Image (cartoon, helix red, strand yellow):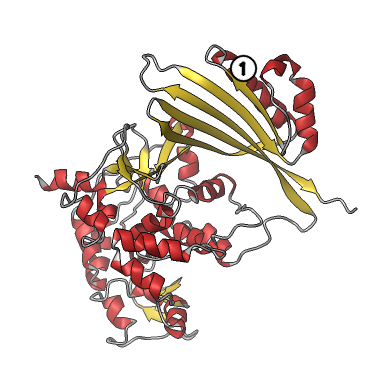
Amino acid sequence: MENGDCDYMMTKPVTLNVGGHLYTTTMSTLQRHPDSMLGAMFCGDLPTTRDSQGNYFIDRDGTLFHYILNFLRTSELILPVDFMKTDLLRKEADFYQIEPLIQCLNNPKPAYPLDTFEQMTKPVTLNVGGHLYTTTLSTLQRYPDSMLGGMFRGDLPTTRDSQGNYFIDRDGTLFRYILNFLRTSELILPVSFTELDLLRKEADFYQIEPLIHSLNDPKPLYSLDTYEQMTKPVTLNVGGHLYTTTLSTLQRYPDSMLGGMFRGDLPTTRDAQGNYFIDRDGTLFRYILNFLRTSELTRPVDFTEMDLLRKEADFYQIEPLIQCLNDPKPPYPLDTFEQVVELSSTRKLSKYSNPVAVIITQLTVTTKVHALLEGISNNFTKWNKHMMDTRDCQVSFTFGPCDYHQEVSLRVHLMDFITNQGFTIRNTRVHHMSERANENTVEHNWTFCRPAYKVDD
């Protein structure tokens, strides 16, 4: 197999059905630990099973596989603060035979001694030719054989300026690209960048071999600067979760990894449907994307996965989000809270009819805003024959195979009604399931939010 073909196979999206939960990742992630059961399965040493959709099937706990896959992606075990299933997760790790994960679960200690961790993550300020940069020792030592690695490991002498900052007498403007490479291991340059020769000299000075290699084998750059291109919908498959947004949103922070990807400075991967694929946590990407849309970090009051969200923010290199997560503030002013409405459309589809037939559709509105539910009950009497009761903060409408167009009409009217009450769409999600041999289930979800003031009793 040619090298290019091999690279493609290792980065091609792969979908796994683990106990009924679908996950999308890459061969390289699944083979990260070659001695593991997954490593053997996906390098051909063990047999594999496919479901009726062609996805690889593993008959194990699909919920806990979320943490297994994130460990394969990051080599770190990050669990929610209130995680209560460590014994079950340990059994899953034993089944998959991932020794580093088993060790983490049997001996849960910080990755570094506390004093070492604090030292490596403590801010360090450099004065490079009069330009000040703040980073960490772990970033500066990313490439131990480089000049910076030697300096900040103590093998080479260092110089301080009058303010105590480390001083390096080199081009301060170009050091921005040097430092970003240390942070991301990717070379990200503006489309109009014209100082490649000078940057090569800087890379030679700092002796960063991967950067020197990137500069000697540059990838073509392109620009997407027209209005139509920037506002055209773009669909991302993030770990099996589909999100739709625009190029302008993805490029909001040009120095981020997403900014580089969708400006053309970094390579991208597509799944079988042509969606851009990113092998990261799909559930948490909701908060990443909402931050790109609003420049505000909004999360549920009972959110427990801050450590994992920090890891995702670090991966995407969104500095303002990283700052928000490192200096968290209350999600809302103390006298306000957020009211939420969830609208879901669940369709059961026949697998074997051509064209695909809708067997049944259910629309469900879920909210604790009882006035909204009462308004729906009072204003949508045209659909009474489809309406179910409104207990448990829900109102549902069920449509048979001949009522598909009515369901679409009702959904449009419901969305208009909800937005007219002051709610705005915060998030959209699509989820595909295969519950029966002859059926597929497709769920579309819309989350609406509006601020509200607390009222004293």
Q: Looking at the rendering, which quadrant does residue 1 occupy? A: top left
Foreground residue, 337 or 56?
Answer: 56
Residue in the image at 68% along x and 60% along y: 330
Q: Tell which residue pokes out farthest to the top in this image.
A: 402
Q: In the image, is residue 96 above or below residue 418?
A: below
Residue in the image at 75% along x and 32% along y: 373
Q: In the image, is residue 94 above or below residue 127?
A: above
Foreground residue, 35 or 162?
Answer: 35
Task: Name the residue beneath numbered marker 1.
Answer: 409
| 146 sits to left or right of 408 | left
Instruction: Locate residue 362, reporting x and y percent.
Output: 58, 26
Of the residues shown, which amino acid type is indicated by label 1? Ser
Question: Is residue 225 among what the camera can see?
Answer: no
Q: Tell which residue pokes out farthest to the right in this image.
A: 457
Residue in the image at 52% along x and 37% along y: 429
Other-residue count near label 1 (Cα within 10 Å), few / some / many at <14 / 14–19 / ≥20: few
Instruction: Locate residue 46, reporting x and y percent.
Output: 18, 51
Q: Tell which residue pokes out farthest to the left in this image.
A: 1
| 348 sits to left or right of 138 | right
Instruction: Locate residue 360, reporting x and y percent.
Output: 53, 21
Q: Looking at the rendering, which quadrant does residue 302 occupy? A: bottom right
Question: Is residue 449 among what the camera can see?
Answer: yes
Instruction: Locate residue 41, reporting x and y percent.
Output: 22, 51
Residue in the image at 60% along x and 54% along y: 297
> Element at badge 1?
helix
